[in-house]
Amino acid sequence: MELAERTAATPESNGAGRQSGSLKRELGLFTATALVIGNMVGSGIFLLPSSLASTAGPVSILAWVFTGIGAMLLALVFARLGRAYPKTGGPYVYVRRAFGDFMGFWTAWSYWINAWVGNAAIAIAFAGYLAVFWPRATTYWVATVIAIVLVWVLTLVNLAGVKQAGWVQSVTTVIKFVPLLVIGVVGLFFMHGSNFTPFTTVHGFDWGISSAMLLTLWAFIGLESATVPAEEVKDPERTIPRATIIGTSATTILYLISSIALFGMIATPVLAKSTSPFADGANVIFGGTGGGKFIAVVAMVSIFGVLNGWILLQGRVPLAAAQDGLFPKQFAQVDPKRKTPVVGIVASSVLITIVLALNFQQKGSIVNLFTDIIIIATLTALIPYAFAASAEMYLFITDRPSFSGVNLARNSVIAMLALAYSSWAIWGAGFKPVTEGVMLLLAGIPVFLWVKWRQSLEVEPRAATKPSTPEAATTET
């Protein structure tokens, strides 16, 4: 969908004054819900069962339950914020409104990192399912090359221009949602109890549930999708909350049923080594390889579509911040003919390539590569989620008219639980991933300082040429 250029907000407006330009409200409830589901159901569910099997085993089913509860808490937070502030930008808008420019920048910075780092994982997942037809695709270096080529093919597609495609989102969501649900429901009748033992492969105080939760949360990244294009949603005060809750609920049910079925159908050691777990599950149900190949095609179409959507997003996130003066102004440049943020898209894809190239030097399976990348991507998504929950609690106090009719006590508890959940998920990542994630966030501080310094240089010459007194102005005239 095309994004019109938005005027930069003044410091006093704190983000509230950014104008929508010529954005059209064309997204109804069905399309907005499809956007939420479609941006969540992608590479995560298609390859995550293997990562979970190798990380913790069948106990990961409990991680899906806890993550589903946490995702619903976050969905409620975004539903209320989306109703109160139907502005394009999602979490960035809410955090900047509550806490000012720097926290707004950090939210946009973190969300942007999540977008392009996550895209590296999505591209790797595509190679995993391609292996159903071309076994060599599981080779580490081949998978990396495939992922890089796929990223740049879709980068060129996005640079060529993007038209309104809500109906495409709806169709692709149905294409991938229905087969996965069928595999999950039918697979429940092909389970063997012995596959659930041992129930966990980790001997710790939480059986590895915390580590598994960080992985399962990756499959819920995107639950805020309906809030991002808020100014293009019909009746946003009603549509955004409903789409967010319906989409998150439906996705949670899908994930839980399909995960139980796969762990019940396939032994944990086998599942842990699978590069296409849903294809393997289809083979168990239907026999032979026909069902698996069909699911593999569905997976590749789904992953292709999700990667295309997130490459679109990776350019829009810095675009919004740059138009508010919080990212380098080059990111605000929009191609006048194709209406695409060229700098944001290309810069992000270059960073994706670097991530994939650096991991190319390591040795291991593509499942391990996928797991390592999504841990960082999920961490950088959790920061905006935690900030958004905090922003809601703050805005309850400072901007109560925007939440008229809302039970502030009950919803404050929900926001606090959402914040607690986000914090728990960050803690569950472990010392090394958290350290890497924090360093990525700290890397944004020099960028913020550079942007503000450049702005000060632009303001000072204008101030120097401006008449300082009424008398001076009269003299000049």
Image (cartoon, rainbow, N blue to C red):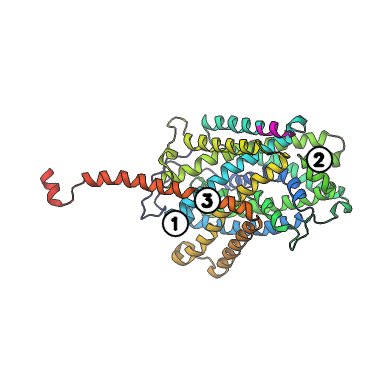
Residue occupied by mark 2: 280
Q: Please, what is the three-letter code of the amino acid marked with disc 3?
A: Leu
Q: Secondary structure at mark 2?
A: helix
Looking at this view, is 461 or 45 the one in front? 461
Query: Does the magenta stretch mainly form a helix, a strand or a loop?
Result: helix
Residue 245 occupies quadrant = bottom right
Q: Tell which residue pokes out farthest to the left in this image.
A: 475
Mark in front: 3 vs 2: 3
Query: Residue 472: percent from the left, percent from the top?
Result: 13, 48
Q: Please, what is the three-letter code of the amino acid marked with disc 1?
A: Arg
How much space separates mark 1 and mark 2, taking CA atoms? 47 Å
Q: Secondary structure at mark 1?
A: helix
Name which of mark 3 and mark 2 comes first in the sequence.
2
Query: Residue 476: percent from the left, percent from the top?
Result: 13, 43
Residue occupied by mark 3: 441
Does the magenta-highlighted stretch encompass residue 142? yes
Can residue 88 be seen by looking at this rendering?
Answer: no
How much space separates mark 3 and mark 1, taking CA atoms? 20 Å
Can residue 337 be seen by looking at this rendering?
Answer: yes
Name which of mark 3 and mark 1 comes first in the sequence.
1
State which region is magenta.
138-144
Left or right, residue 429 beside residue 11: right
Looking at this view, is 83 or 270 the one in front? 270
Category of crowding for the residue at label 3, using alpha-carbon neighbours closer than 10 angstroms: few (below 14), some (14–19), many (at least 20): some
Query: Residue 243: percent from the left, percent from the top?
Result: 60, 51
Split into 4 quadrants, where in the image is the C terminus? top left
Residue occupied by mark 1: 97
Question: Marks 2 and 1: in contact by CB < 8 Å?
Answer: no
Category of crowding for the residue at label 2, using alpha-carbon neighbours closer than 10 angstroms: few (below 14), some (14–19), many (at least 20): many
Give the residue drawn at x 74%, y 63%.
205
Q: Secondary structure at mark 3?
A: helix
